[in-house]
Amino acid sequence: MQTVLVTGIEPFDGETLNPSWEAARAVDERVIGGARVVARQLPCVIADVRQALLGAIAEVDPVLVLCLGQAGGRSDISVERVAINVVDARIPDNAGRQPIDEPVIAGGPAAYFSALPIKALVRRLRESGIPASVSQTAGTYNCNAIFYSLLHCIATERPALRGGFIHVPYLPQMAAAHPGAPSMEARTLIAAIEIMVATALEVSADLKEGGGATH
């Protein structure tokens, strides 16, 4: 049976939960689209997260990798389009470090595009009643470092592997501490992961439809 790796991130910035990990661990060992899902937690430590991700990939040997991350303030499932080779941390990570204007991987390309059918994922999510959109930026913090590291691995070591990064909103209990911030129930996040895994396993060529932004 094929294996799919789904990663989430440990809590950071004073939070006690991270919705990406709560959702990822909920699908651990499920069978979706004929593949077994394995969930792994990644650290919010920029200097360590690449090796943690590569270690999980080597251990699991997946055909597909979905990396999830928290995006407090966003209102929908944000399927990321592009990872950039820069770390410019607005806040310290969980090791207390705050890299500024450093590459994710020295000498690597400026950017990589997702190796997922991003617009097909968004369409399937919307058809299922789950708010979703294509996002043009994964930021310049730990999430982007994960995204770039994954795509660099695909480009240089595992060309048959498919994968990408998805940002998810706060859970309601987290949003309660951030008045006015949008949130998404855990059961909806879990359903979204199931839809995205099944779609990514099924769809190889992405849809040709609008998903861009004006700003």
Image: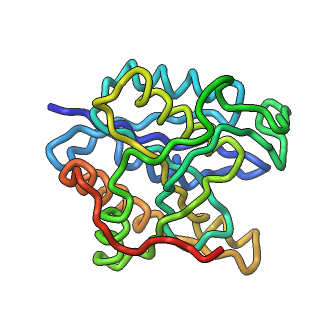
Q: Is residue 117 above or below residue 74?
A: above
Residue 62 sits in quarter:
top left
- Tell me where residue 50 sits by quadrant: top right
Q: Residue 129 sits in which quadrant?
A: bottom left
Q: Taking 133 as reference, is 101 above or below it? A: above
Whether residue 132 sits left or right of residue 141 in the image: it is: left
Q: Residue at x 36, y 65 (%)?
A: 119
Q: Is residue 85 above or below residue 198?
A: above
Q: Nearer the viewer, residue 31 or 147?
A: 147
Q: Residue at x 67, y 45 (%)?
A: 11
State which quarter of the image contains the N terminus. Answer: top left
Residue 94 shown left or right of residue 212 in the figure: right
Tell me how many marks there are: 0
Would you place residue 205 above or below residue 103 in this image? below
Q: Position of residue 147 (x, y in %)?
A: 54, 41
State the colouring used for the structure image. Answer: rainbow
Measured from the top left, where is residue 29 in percent x and y?
29, 39
What residue appears at the point 30 percent right and 64 percent down from the top-left corner? 120
Residue in the picture at 48% in, 66% down:
134
Position of 99 with respect to 10 (left or right) is right
Q: Looking at the picture, how far across and down is residue 67, in whole percent?
A: 47, 44
Q: Nearer the viewer, residue 113 or 41?
A: 113
Image coordinates for residue 79, horizontal then vertical, percent: 47, 59
Placement of the C terminus among the 4 image quadrants: bottom right
